[in-house]
Image (tube, grey):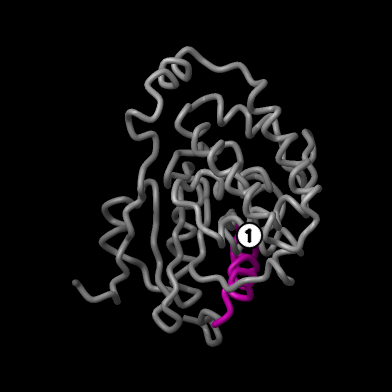
């Protein structure tokens, strides 16, 4: 490990360090989650939306898997060898033992409460996933929490809703994802409502957030739904429509 190649204590500064190293190494890696929104949205870095961040989440194309397996150890991370051996075709884990921080890397597909196909979504500019994918990565969380809602508020404040604009939230893309899977649609619907309620307690420009949510949801409702979607909608909530992601234990967590 090169001198000075150790994870930084601040997650945002660390995300920037990783982004620079990945660019130098020619490894395509896109930051997701709250840290991704922080780098993409200035509102996330100041009150009332400023918050602390923990683990780092990324998405990569399968072609960059080997590059990532070299990159993170060189940056001072330890691989979760067992996890990476068993599930490394779709997901990788690394750990910063000094700061107790995990790095979760999704390969081609983002799979948490729901599944998002990212295979054609990772060639965007910059260190982060697109604003549309950052939005979906948060809105798809079935057990969404206040931190997630704060992140979404920052993202919507700082990005207009428009098609054919890499720095905007694409309502047609969000609509296509929702129209392909009733379960995804239902979770998005619930979380949009929770977000509408959450912004009432935040000192932000609520009209901007409401207006952009309205634009997105209008597109979602207008998007034609498949027969599969309609059949699943008839079943509704009588069957679970989401997954509860299993927590991956770091090698430094003691067995309970």
Return the residue nearer the eye: 245 or 148.
148
Residue that sits furthest to the top in the current view: 227
Q: Which residue is drawn at the image coordinates 47% and 27% (left, top)? A: 182
Against 118, is 67 above or below? below
Return the residue nearer the eye: 234 or 64.
234
Against 163, is 72 above or below? below
Q: Which residue is mark 1?
A: 150
Return the residue nearer the eye: 157 or 110.
157
Quadrant, the C terminus: bottom left
Judge left or right: residue 168 versus residue 250. Answer: right
| Residue bounds of the magenta highlight | 9-26
From the top left corner, tell me how far across and down residue 23 is, in percent: 64, 62
Dominant secondary structure (helix, strand or loop) of the stretch shown in magenta? helix
Tally of marks: 1
Judge left or right: residue 146 versus residue 249. Answer: right
The picture quadrant where one finds residue 170 is top right
């Amino acid at each position: 490990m090169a001198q000075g190649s150790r994870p930084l204590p601040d997650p945002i500064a660390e995300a920037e360090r990783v982004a620079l190293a990945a660019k130098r190494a020619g490894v395509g890696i896109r930051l997701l989650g709250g840290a991704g929104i922080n780098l993409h949205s200035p509102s996330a870095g100041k009150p009332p939306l400023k918050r602390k961040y923990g683990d780092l989440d990324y998405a990569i194309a399968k072609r960059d898997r080997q590059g990532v397996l070299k990159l993170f150890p060189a940056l001072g991370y330890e691989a979760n060898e067992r996890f990476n051996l068993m599930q490394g075709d779709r997901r990788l884990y690394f750990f910063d033992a000094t700061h107790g921080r995990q790095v979760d890397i999704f390969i081609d597909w983002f799979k948490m409460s729901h599944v998002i196909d990212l295979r054609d979504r990772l060639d965007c500019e910059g260190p982060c996933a697109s604003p549309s994918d950052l939005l979906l990565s948060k809105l798809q969380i079935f057990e969404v929490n206040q931190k997630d809602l704060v992140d979404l508020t920052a993202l919507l404040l700082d990005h207009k809703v428009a098609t054919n604009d890499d720095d905007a939230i694409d309502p047609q893309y969000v609509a296509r994802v929702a129209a392909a899977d009733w379960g995804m649609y239902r979770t998005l619907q619930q979380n949009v409502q929770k977000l509408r309620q959450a912004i009432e307690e935040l000192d932000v420009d609520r009209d901007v957030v409401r207006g952009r949510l309205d634009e997105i949801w209008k597109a979602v409702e207008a998007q034609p739904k498949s027969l599969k979607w309609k059949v699943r909608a008839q079943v509704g909530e009588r069957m679970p429509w989401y997954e509860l992601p299993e927590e991956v234990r770091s090698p430094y967590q003691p067995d309970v």
